[in-house]
Image (cartoon, coloured by chain):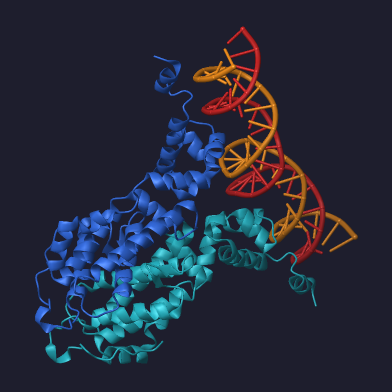
Chain colours: A blue, B cyan, C red, D orange
Amino acid sequence: MNRAADNQKHNQKNRPETQAKLVKAVGEVLAERGFAKLGVNAVARQAGVDKVLIYRYFDDLDGLMQAYARSSDFWPSSIELLGDAEAREQLKTMPFAKAFALVFRRYANALRSRPLTLEILSWETIERNALTIALEEVREAAGLELMAFLSETNPPPADWQAIANIFSGAIHYLAIRSRKITVFSGMNIADDEGWERLITSIELLVDNLPTDNPAIDNRNKDLTAET
Amino acid sequence: MNRAADNQKHNQKNRPETQAKLVKAVGEVLAERGFAKLGVNAVARQAGVDKVLIYRYFDDLDGLMQAYARSSDFWPSSIELLGDAEAREQLKTMPFAKAFALVFRRYANALRSRPLTLEILSWETIERNALTIALEEVREAAGLELMAFLSETNPPPADWQAIANIFSGAIHYLAIRSRKITVFSGMNIADDEGWERLITSIELLVDNLPTDNPAIDNRNKDLTAET
DNA sequence: TGCTTGTGTCACCAATCGGTGATATCTTCT
DNA sequence: AGAAGATATCACCGATTGGTGACACAAGCA
């Protein structure tokens, strides 16, 4: 065994490993102390490494945040929201309101189960930095892809871009707020029951839009779906 | 003219005036530098006064923020959203969807025209402090009052608490985001045109809910309203 | 063996933060 | 006029921040 391999085991001089420690520490600081406390000192301390290495390996904290952005899947993939090719075909055969509500149900679940994404999403409202910009870009691309898919599923005539933004805006906001408060305007937003009411209401609203073809009017269909 | 009145003019030793300067400075720092930069040093500097007076007159920054909360109308009154008693009666005679959309249109305008409210609303997602808690309370009370009024206006059967929270959540989120970005999921949220699309879509969604009494079904009414 | 290069630690810097004690100055009352 | 109390300023504290230069050590090559 040569010395290089030996040192690798003992976590001594090993640049890639140190870089990985720093990238990982970004996520840990975000999770434990939040974006407001994310700084070179906190990250270096969390990684157990000197802060000067942040400047050497990533130029500055922005560079390190960009590396973290590339390392993590903090946004749901289209697979997670729409499923694979087969599942997408199945979605298209469903009544529009059901498919629409199902996608937004998955969207809400995806965000609510990603505390780090909620932290970044929340910090987006305060400041634009390397990490929030990275999130903006992937979200913008995903949003357009989602809109493109939904437009293939025989939607009734309406401003679907505006409607989708209303629902995703509401989901973003209520998911973010549910980290700090449990009740919003008298309604519980911290448990699954409250979110079931929200998703059900989205489906109700969409389900009752008039279609251009009355034969495929989906009104009064049952509202059960996956949970 | 006695010395007290003379000194008041020259802004020398005058406790109420100094307190007012500090309270005012809170709003100015929020507007110019944001919540993240709000601290005793910044406020005192902005007020042109020594920071020790914050502790003397308000205990600490929290106390000063509470005083600021009492001084400012950073939330729309029920008059602004619903109008006076006469206007409310008129609202009740309108088709439900129109009244509902009109209230939310005013709500969106009220928030979008209050940059300081948006700043606090945005910081609510990060931290709970004296100011955000004050905003929570007034918002919670206003939300319940709004729900109480809407329930008097013959709404079709639905989970109106959930629906109202979806729309107000969306308005909060998109209003906050429009301070940092102009486009959300391909749609402009920074100008009045984009918001017109949002409000119109809200009215469309609500307008098509089935009523329990078909005689007052509002479907296919025209969608024009005040701007 | 020596030399260079890569890797990491340490000590320090100026700036800013929240917070406090000592002191100066103004106001008011006697 | 002079004492007493309210009002405001100033100088300082320890802690923390982002950032940098000097140095120690290990790896690999000549």
Return the x and y of residue B22 as percentages of the image width and height: 62, 63
> Is A42 or B84 nearer to us in this picture?
A42
The reply to whether residue B144 is in sight is no
Q: Is residue B45 left or right of residue A95?
A: right
Across and down, in percent, residue A169 comes to: 34, 66
Quarter holding the N terminus of chain A is top left
**On screen, residue B2 above or below A113:** below
Q: Quadrant of residue B215?
A: bottom left
- Left or right: B192, with B148 as reference point: right
Q: Is residue B71 visible?
A: yes
The residue that appears at 36% across and 59% down in the rendered structure is A139
Q: Position of residue B194 (x, y in %)?
A: 40, 77
Residue at 30% from the left image edge and 79% from the top image edge: B201
Quadrant of the frame with the C terminus of chain A: bottom left
> Residue A106 or B31: which is nearer the viewer?
A106
The image quadrant that residue A95 belongs to is bottom left
* As drawn, A15 above or below A88: above
| Residue B135, percent from left and from top | 43, 65
State the residue in front, B88 or A83: A83
In the rendered image of this protein, does residue C4 appear above or below residue A86?
above
Residue placed at 36% from the left, 45% from the top? Answer: A72
